[in-house]
Image (cartoon, rainbow, N blue to C red):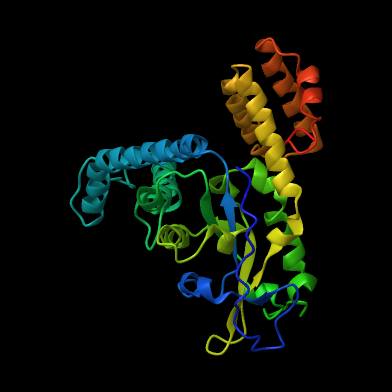
Amino acid sequence: MPPKTTKRATKALPKASSAIPDPFTPVPTEILPLLDTLDKEIVYITHIDHHPAWFKKRVFFVPVGLNVTIGLVLLWRAYAASPWYWSILMSFLGNHNETTIYFASTPWLQLIWMVLVRSSVFLVDFILFRIIGPWPWGFFFESPGNPISWRFKTGFRDEEVYVRESRGWGARDLLGEAEGSSGRAGSESPFFKTRILPAVETRRLAEKTGYMLMDKDFDLSFAAMTKAAQMIDRKEITLDNVQKSVFVWVGSQETGQWTVWDCWKLDGGSETEARKKIMIFKDRLTAMGKESLFFRWVELIQFESSAPGGFTQERQIEAANKAKKLFEDEGIDFDTFIKEIGGLDGLPGME
């Protein structure tokens, strides 16, 4: 279904400061209840994910399985290693046992070997519990929001709100206020060009589900996503209020204000046309009794675009060739089919 074209309400806060850099403007007042719960030091990006609910569910179950497996391994390791570590502690306190090392009577080679083995075990356990351990904890229990609580409260929807938050950088960097920064703010900031613009690229958002947009520059704010979904359910805001936009707090903590760059306006009709093209693609396959082929194509493009190294031109060509093979296996002439729907333009990953 094409995205709504209803214009966002224009009622906004007065422009209290001339220091608001382009292209940002004061936010509409109706979205303030959501923004007021966010950290003013962080830059946020919102967008609507239109991938089908069944596909989001399939993608989400991968990290669920991974984190459950890691959690079980950690529990097993804690159970298996606890007696050994307890014995070492008792030995250290002077209660000799099977873990005690007698330096005076142990040969040097054997002593070195024992120290190396024990150090390796310590290192592996440190990595397991200090570095890997926080993954399942954050996935299931992190407060104020985590992936499990978000899904439990909002479920899976065909139209979902995603809220990304800057990771390792923030509002001061974007506004040129951080120590050692260039002093350039907004669209002139290096962070705008290297962090913001790639994150809001239309093709990237069309090819990946929101959950797969986490990277070194952006994390997901599950608490904000939960609150946004609940506000939409209560009709306090609409999907139009959280279309592809960038939010940043400008000014001091006490007298500043939230500002927004409505980058969705730059898409014009391109996103709508692309969505229409996809629907034509799907409807034509459905009419041929090959609807499952459409979903396999979506999975293929999602997988190829998420591979390490980015969706390069070479990977796009490879994805198109694999798509052609899928069609041929179903007895459909790929070139003829594409010609009938008006070419490849507008189909993600097949330009």
179, 28: nearer the viewer: 28
Q: 5 or 330: which is nearer to us?
A: 5
Residue 115, how many percent across, how many down?
41, 44
Q: Which residue is found at the position 47% from the left and 58% from the top? A: 225
Seen in the image, is 4 located left or right of residue 341?
Answer: left
Q: Position of residue 283 (x, y in %)?
A: 64, 28
Q: Nearer the viewer, residue 333 or 251?
A: 333
Residue sitting at x 76%, y 20%: 337
Q: Is residue 274 visible?
A: yes
Among the 4 quarters of the image, the one containing residue 264: bottom right
Give residue 78's quadrant in the image: top left
**Residue found at x 81% / y 24%:** 339
Relative to 90, residue 124 above or below: above
Q: Residue at x 25, y 45 (%)?
A: 82
Residue 101 relative to residue 48: left or right: left
Picture coordinates of residue 94 (x, y %)? 20, 55
